Image (spheres, rainbow, N blue to C red):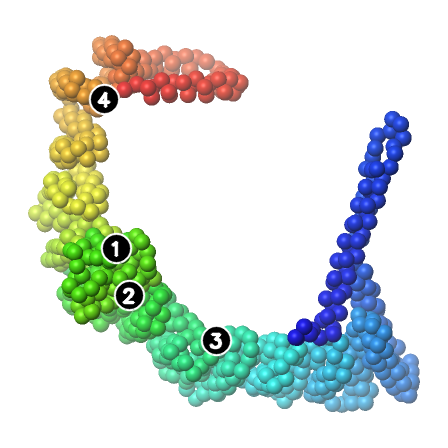
């Protein structure tokens, strides 16, 4: 091997291999014994029994050895402690010195002979006892020879001497693993103990910790090897403690003068961490991050006491953001650049989260306008002491840094998304912080919202580009252009990714269409990045539009101006063909929604009753239904928004039954007009029928009609005739389409009227008619007559039996209904499978009907 392992580590590997070989040998011997026993002749009539497997050892030989050695070392340590603390006084000065010297020398010298014989583990145990005896020697020396010396100062000196001695002992016997870590751990105590002995506290203790960390770092950097790991770990702990102490003192400082001393110590911590990050071989990014954070705290600490908390955070941000620029400094090692940038980004993220939380409070505060619409009251400013200015400033700074990262990290979409969101939040809330006039606030926020929406519309992705761009990319992949030549007549359009399906689309702003005559096709990564940026811009535009719309409800002129402008902008965005389909769909839905809100506002302006606001709202879904296929890719979202507008109209009219009947009828007309087109027949036909029936019932109820059959039977007759003709022309037409609306027009309102009619004539006539409809459905195997007639017949029967059931229930004992229910459950449970099979057969039979 080119790089042989140290003897100690190689011995460990050899021991492990031997243990595995012993375990494998034991298993093979056991298996061999069992196989021999299986082949041996068995006694006549006696069944062959496999031998009982021998249990393997639960602990390996080296493991048992280590346990014994540890126990022996612990017992010797306990004996030494007992001797030192209890039996010490029974000996004289000479006896004490002789015993300690002999025992310590024997314990420290025995590992030499043991290592020569190859007993490394035993040497480790005896050496550990020797190290403990040196500690007892130091305590005995203090207790007998120097009782007047300060205990803390003596402990500091003793720790330094012991650390040096243990380090030398470990270097003289490199096969032992305990002395070197023990020396390093003990070396962490002298400086802090000396500082405590000198009465130091706070920042002075931080200097002691920093000095200890510096010594550890020097040892790890100057003497690499087995010392590096332990020294690095110890130095990291000491340096971290110094950093935390400095941060606490800097945060507690009440003036610039008081903050200078913590800043100096933090600067020293930063310098040490950066030196270690520059020279170390591992965890360089972590050390660079810690050093950068200490530097930020050191530079911002003196300014913090003189500023408000919000502006102090901005000061820290100003100091931290330049660290992100370390990504472009090629002179720095890559881990150091990454660590510095991570520290700057971490501070920026914390400040951005706090600022976005403040923006959320501003947006939520606007909801107070809903308590009193059109009251023309100017909302109170977000802050009265000027501290609110800090949030937009920090957001703009962070957004600028994120936008700079877009160029540094071209393959990452996160910086662009962060830049868009934070920039929108800063510009949207800045007019509120500036306490501008309401008109100026509306104008500024509308401009920001429209600009963000335009950014969403201009974003292109591989899935959302328009058809001409897709055609150009496909033609370029095939070696030509959609018009028979290149766009400029000079060449063809190369495909950058080589995707046969046109993995890239014609880039917008990524190259020039003129000049060389080529059409550069964007790769999937830039396209995905632009797509995520566009989605973020669309979400910000949506939130801004909703916020401005709510705020505009404070005044009549603002309501019509803001809603009209946003509605027109959304309509224009929906008609912008180069935009992605998702952006156009969202704009179309918003345009329909704003049109409906304008209709509601118009009704409120005319001071009409709330129920009469509904008919103007129905103009919006009527317009969407009239446009139909001309809406193109935005047809479905526009129709969904139109349906929501229709539900809004019905909700507005619920307070006045006659108006509600009119609105339901008009909504049915709109749905029927939409159902004229074949592609919307199934989607709009059923709602039209339901709306017409509901309008009829509501109108009859509003007119207090007691005999609805006089109005519904003519409708049923006409509808059944139309259905019959439809079935003759189209035998495949379902019974629900042909006969369902006509039968429901009479059966449903008559069923409701039966439950409120105490006489016998209506139930008799309705039951007879329902029976006839059911028999007709069964004979013709038609689902609609069968189910509607059967349901009506069941309802009439229940109505007639209800009084008798009540009488019977009153006459029965109270315990009988629960008992009958229990018996029924037991019976059903006993024949559960058969019941399920019968129910399945019934469902299949109904499913076969037309």
Instruction: Using the image, determine if residue 327 lies above or below residue 451.
Output: below
Instruction: Tell me which numbered mark, 2 or 4, is placed earlier along the sequence.
Output: 2
Give whichever of 145, 206 is nearer the camera.
Answer: 206
Q: Which residue is mark 2?
A: 420
Disc 2: CA contacts within 10 A as few (<14), some (14-19) or many (>=20): many
Query: Mark 2–mark 4 contact, CB under 8 Å?
Result: no
Task: Check residue 224 in the rendering and tell me which mark sits there, or answer none.
Answer: none
Disc 1: CA contacts within 10 A as few (<14), some (14-19) or many (>=20): some
Q: Which residue is at a point 74% across and 85% down the rendered structure image?
A: 168
Instruction: Tell me which numbered mark, 4 or 3, is placed earlier along the sequence.
Output: 3
Give whichever of 381, 234 is nearer the camera.
Answer: 234
Residue 156's x, y, as percent?
Answer: 69, 86
Residue 736, quarter of the rendered image: top left
Q: Which residue is mark 1?
A: 478
Q: Is residue 549 visible?
A: no
Q: Secondary structure at mark 4?
A: loop
The answer for how far apart the CA atoms under marks 3 and 2 are is: 29 Å
The answer for how far apart the CA atoms under marks 2 and 4 are is: 56 Å
Instruction: Tell me which numbered mark, 3 or 1, is placed earlier along the sequence.
Output: 3
Q: Secondary structure at mark 2?
A: helix
Which is in the foreground here, disc 4 or disc 1? 1
The answer for how far apart the CA atoms under marks 3 and 1 are is: 45 Å
Quarter of the image that includes the C terminus: top left
Which is in the foreground here, disc 3 or disc 1? 1
Query: Mark 4–mark 1 contact, CB under 8 Å?
Result: no
């Amino acid at each position: 091997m080119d790089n042989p392992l140290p003897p100690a580590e190689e011995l460990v590997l050899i021991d492990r291999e031997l243990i595995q070989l012993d375990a494998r040998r034991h298993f093979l011997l056991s298996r061999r014994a069992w196989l021999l026993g299986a082949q041996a002749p068995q006694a006549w009539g006696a069944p062959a029994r496999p031998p009982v497997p021998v249990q393997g050892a639960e602990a390996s030989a080296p493991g048992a050895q280590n346990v014994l050695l540890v126990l022996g070392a612990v017992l010797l340590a306990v004996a030494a402690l007992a001797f030192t603390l209890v039996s010490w006084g029974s000996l004289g000065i000479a006896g004490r010195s002789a015993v300690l010297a002999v025992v310590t020398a024997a314990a420290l010298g025995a590992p030499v002979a043991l290592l020569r014989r190859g007993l490394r583990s035993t040497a480790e145990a005896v050496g550990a006892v020797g190290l403990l005896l040196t500690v007892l020697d130091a305590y005995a020396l203090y207790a007998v020879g120097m009782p007047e010396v300060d205990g803390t100062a003596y402990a500091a000196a003793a720790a330094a001497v012991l650390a040096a001695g243990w380090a030398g002992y470990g270097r003289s016997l490199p096969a032992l693993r305990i002395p070197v870590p023990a020396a390093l751990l003990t070396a962490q105590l002298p400086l802090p103990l000396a500082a405590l002995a000198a009465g130091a506290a706070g920042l002075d203790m931080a200097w002691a910790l920093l000095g200890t960390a510096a010594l550890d770092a020097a040892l790890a950097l100057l003497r690499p090897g087995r010392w590096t790991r332990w020294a690095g770990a110890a130095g990291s702990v000491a340096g971290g403690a110094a950093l935390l102490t400095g941060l606490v003192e800097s945060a507690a400082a009440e003036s610039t003068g008081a903050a200078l001393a913590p800043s100096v110590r933090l600067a020293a911590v930063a310098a040490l961490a950066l030196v270690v990050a520059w020279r170390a071989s591992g965890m360089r990014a972590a050390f660079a991050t810690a050093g950068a954070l200490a530097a930020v705290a050191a530079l911002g600490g003196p300014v913090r006491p003189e500023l408000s908390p919000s502006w102090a955070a901005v000061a820290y941000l100003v100091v931290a953001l330049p660290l992100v620029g370390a990504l472009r400094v090629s002179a720095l090692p890559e881990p150091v650049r990454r660590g510095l940038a991570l520290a700057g980004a971490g501070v920026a993220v914390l400040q951005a989260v706090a600022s976005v939380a403040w923006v959320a409070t501003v947006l939520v505060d606007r909801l107070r306008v809903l308590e009193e619409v059109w009251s023309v009251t100017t909302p109170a400013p977000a802050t009265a002491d000027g501290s609110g200015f800090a949030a937009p400033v920090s957001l703009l700074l962070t957004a600028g840094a994120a936008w700079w990262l877009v160029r540094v990290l071209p393959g990452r979409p996160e910086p662009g998304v962060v830049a868009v969101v934070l920039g929108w939040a800063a510009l949207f809330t800045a007019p509120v912080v500036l306490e501008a006039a309401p008109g100026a606030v509306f104008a500024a926020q509308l401009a920001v919202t429209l600009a963000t929406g335009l950014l969403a519309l201009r974003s292109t992705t591989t899935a959302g580009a328009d058809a001409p761009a897709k055609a150009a990319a496909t033609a370029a992949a095939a070696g030509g252009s959609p018009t028979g030549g290149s766009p400029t007549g000079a060449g063809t359009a190369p495909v950058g990714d080589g995707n046969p399906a046109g993995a890239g689309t014609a880039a917008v702003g990524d190259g020039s269409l003129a000049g060389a005559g080529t059409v550069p096709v964007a790769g999937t990564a830039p396209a995905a990045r632009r797509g995520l940026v566009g989605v973020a811009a669309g979400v910000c535009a949506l939130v801004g539009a909703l916020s401005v719309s709510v705020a505009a409800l404070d005044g009549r002129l603002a309501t019509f101006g803001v809603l009209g402008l946003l509605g027109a902008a959304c309509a224009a965005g929906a008609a912008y063909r180069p935009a992605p389909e998702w952006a156009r769909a969202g704009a179309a839905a918003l345009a329909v929604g704003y049109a409906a809100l304008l209709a509601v506002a118009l009704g409120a302006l005319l001071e009409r009753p709330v129920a009469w606001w509904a008919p103007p709202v129905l103009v919006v879904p009527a317009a969407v239904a009239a446009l139909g296929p001309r809406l193109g890719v935005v047809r479905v979202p526009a129709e969904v928004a139109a349906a929501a507008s229709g539900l809004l109209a019905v909700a507005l009219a619920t307070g006045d039954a006659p108006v509600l009947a009119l609105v339901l009828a008009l909504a049915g007309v709109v749905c029927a007009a939409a159902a004229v087109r074949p592609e919307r027949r199934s989607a709009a036909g059923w709602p039209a029928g339901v709306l017409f029936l509901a309008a009829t019932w509501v109108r009859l109820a509003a007119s207090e009609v007691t005999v609805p059959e006089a109005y519904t039977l003519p409708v049923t007759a006409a509808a059944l005739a139309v259905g019959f003709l439809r079935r003759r022309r189209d035998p495949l037409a379902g019974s629900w389409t042909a006969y369902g609306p006509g039968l429901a027009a009479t059966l449903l309102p008559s069923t409701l009227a039966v439950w409120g009619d105490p006489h016998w004539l209506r139930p008799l006539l309705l039951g007879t008619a329902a029976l006839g409809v059911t028999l007709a459905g069964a004979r013709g195997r038609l689902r609609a007559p069968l189910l509607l007639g059967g349901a009506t017949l069941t309802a009439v029967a229940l109505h007639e039996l209800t009084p008798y059931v009540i009488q019977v229930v009153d006459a029965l004992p109270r315990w009988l209904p629960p008992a009958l229910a229990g018996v029924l459950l037991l019976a059903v449970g006993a024949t559960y499978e058969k019941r399920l099979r019968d129910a399945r057969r019934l469902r299949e039979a109904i499913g076969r009907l037309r």
